[in-house]
Image: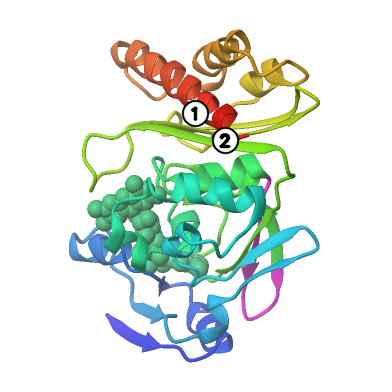
Amino acid sequence: MEYIAAKDPDEVTAALADGDTVVLAGGQSLVLDVTNHALCPARVVDINAVAEFELLTETEGVLRAGPLVRHRTFESDAVGGALGAMLRTVVRHIGHPPIRARGTMAGSLAYAHPAAEWPVLAVILGAELELVTERGRRTVPAERFFTGSFTTVRRPDELLAEVRLPLLPAGTGAGFAEHRPARAKFAETAAMAAVTVVDGLITTALIGLVNAGPCPVRARAAEQVLRGAPFSDAAIRAAAEAAAELDADLSALPAGDRPAKQRAVRMLTRRALTQAREGL
Ligand SMILES: Cc1cc2nc3c(=O)[nH]c(=O)nc-3n(C[C@H](O)[C@H](O)[C@H](O)COP(=O)(O)OP(=O)(O)OC[C@H]3O[C@@H](n4cnc5c(N)ncnc54)[C@H](O)[C@@H]3O)c2cc1C
């Protein structure tokens, strides 16, 4: 396997042009895949020395994160406001500190693990993902980026060059709850929520389910239950019920495993929403 240490963005896209080169970002998934022979690329292009890729900026209501923005960045107050609070709520559930110190948000999206947190967050927030090649660039909404477990619409010669997350309005509370067997493991199931309340009524509810389907799940039925309602215990219970009954995509699970997954979705959605209410 050839190793290329890129120094600028053009070197990265030039290396990717042959379609048999993979990006090395944080290496927290790639190195394991190569070690386990799950992946045997001809070349690896290491992007860690490309300073521009560390860019994290806020412009015109959008947070823009380059391909080297590490999970850990979102643990700090680097991002303010309600979006910063949502990112801080979610990020501490990703692996453990050494993984968060190296792993990147863009790498997690490109990898598309069905139990990863960032893909779900990107989908529910309506993120846009910029894909770049030597020949040009295109922008894909996160909702259309993920096509299944570990699969996305990204072509082999495309670098995920920027993640754009819309800022959240003031008056938004964030919540996250997961069932995870051990700290060094992905969540078995998790739920996250960002809920905006104006004059005592919910104006926007964004709810996502982790590892409750082959693709990140946006719990639209649960969101619908909450829209326009007071943020009451009854509304939370009804939304959690909708998430479990209508939103979770359990089609790939053996029938015998579905009731337990539904129970987990119901309980975790309820907890995530309760935490979001407490955060208002
Ligand atoms: C023990 C353990 C526990 C973990 N627990 C969790 C968890 O709970 N939640 C969670 O979400 N993740 C978890 N992870 C995964 C971690 O978040 C990884 O950091 C993440 O999946 C990949 O990011 P990376 O920057 O390390 O990417 P890499 O490992 O460098 O790359 C992963 C894949 O994405 C491609 N890639 C990376 N960046 C780009 C880019 N910019 N453009 C195009 N392709 C790119 C690579 O070529 C490779 O195929 C865990 C990992 C380990 C080892």
Among numbered discs 2 and 1, the one appearing first in the sequence: 1
Image x and y of residue 261, in percent:
36, 19
Would you place residue 265 above or below residue 64 in this image? above
Q: Is residue 32 left or right of residue 252?
A: left
Quadrant of image for the C terminus: top right
Residue in view at x 30 percent, y 84 percent: 2
Which quadrant of the figure has residue 96?
bottom left
Question: Which residue lies under the disc numbered 1?
Answer: 272
Write the start and end of the magenta stretch as one range. Answer: 126-137
Residue furthest bottom in the image: 7
Find ligand 1 in the image and state its quadrant: bottom left
Disc 2 to disc 1, how far (Cα)? 11 Å
Q: Is residue 259 left or right of residue 220?
A: left
Q: Secondary structure at mark 2?
A: loop
Image x and y of residue 7, in percent:
48, 91
Front one among 33 and 72: 72
Is residue 12 visible from the viewing direction of this image? Answer: yes
Residue in view at x 18 percent, y 59 percent: 36
Image x and y of residue 26, in percent:
37, 69
Question: Which residue lies under the disc numbered 2?
Answer: 279
